[in-house]
Amino acid sequence: MEEQSREDIMIRLLLVDDQPAVRRGLRVRFQLEPDLQVVGEASTGREALTLAQTLSPDVVLMDIEMPGMDGIEAAAALGMVVPQSAVVILSIHTDRQTRMRAQVAGAVAFVEKGGTSDTLLAIIRQAAR
């Protein structure tokens, strides 16, 4: 019964990364998952704020390094404007200080960009609960 209910739930994702190739790769990978739907893509933190207010994603998968408003600033702002959306940080920066800044900003999880897709998928599904 648990498997059936899992398939019935569609997780709506907003991808936020300033590198189009990264967003494209994530989108292609997520299209293979029956319970994930990419509802939007943003290349800056400010664009993510605008799209999140319109799209109300379940999960915002966000890079840290972006021009203008970075991912940590955007995570904090998202918590105020779309508190129902869980922010998962996806970054190459995995030092303790960066992880703590992300957590303080309201991110529910932090995933290393070099990690496995299985780990990322599990964290996205957990964040959507």
Image: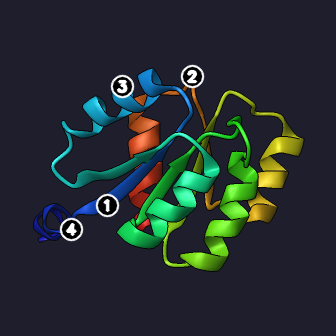
Q: Disc 1 marks which amino acid?
A: Arg
Label 4's element? loop
Residue bearing mark 3? 25
Residue bearing mark 4? 9
Judge depth for marks 3 and 4 and give the one in front. 3
Q: For the residues marked 3 and 1, what is the alpha-carbon distance in whole angstroms? A: 17 Å
N-terminal-most mark, 3 or 4:
4
**Spot occupied by residue 38 in the image (x, y as percentages of width and height):** 30, 49
Q: Residue furthest right?
A: 97
**Spot occupied by residue 34 in the image (x, y as percentages of width and height):** 15, 49
Residue 55 placement: quadrant: bottom left
Residue 98 placement: quadrant: top right
Mark 2 nearby-residue class (10 Å; few <14, some 14–19, many ≥20): few
Mark 4 nearby-residue class (10 Å; few <14, some 14–19, many ≥20): few
Picture layout, residue 54 above or below residue 120: below
Mark 3 nearby-residue class (10 Å; few <14, some 14–19, many ≥20): few
Picture layout, residue 62 above or below residue 52: above
- Please tell me which residue is depicted at 31% across the width and 36% down the height of the picture: 27
Question: Is residue 83 shown to the viewer in this render?
Answer: yes
Residue bearing mark 2? 114
**Spot occupied by residue 50 in the image (x, y as percentages of width and height):** 51, 63
Comparing 95 with 86, the one in front is 86
Question: Is residue 129 shown to the viewer in this render?
Answer: no
Q: Disc 4 marks which amino acid?
A: Ile
**In this rendering, position of residue 65 left or right of residue 28:** right
Q: For the residues marked 4 and 1, what is the alpha-carbon distance in whole angstroms? A: 10 Å
Residue bearing mark 1? 12
Q: For the residues marked 3 and 4, what is the alpha-carbon distance in whole angstroms? A: 23 Å
Judge depth for marks 2 and 3 and give the one in front. 3
Q: For the residues marked 2 and 4, what is the alpha-carbon distance in whole angstroms? A: 28 Å
- Please tell me which residue is depicted at 21% across the width and 39% down the height of the picture: 31
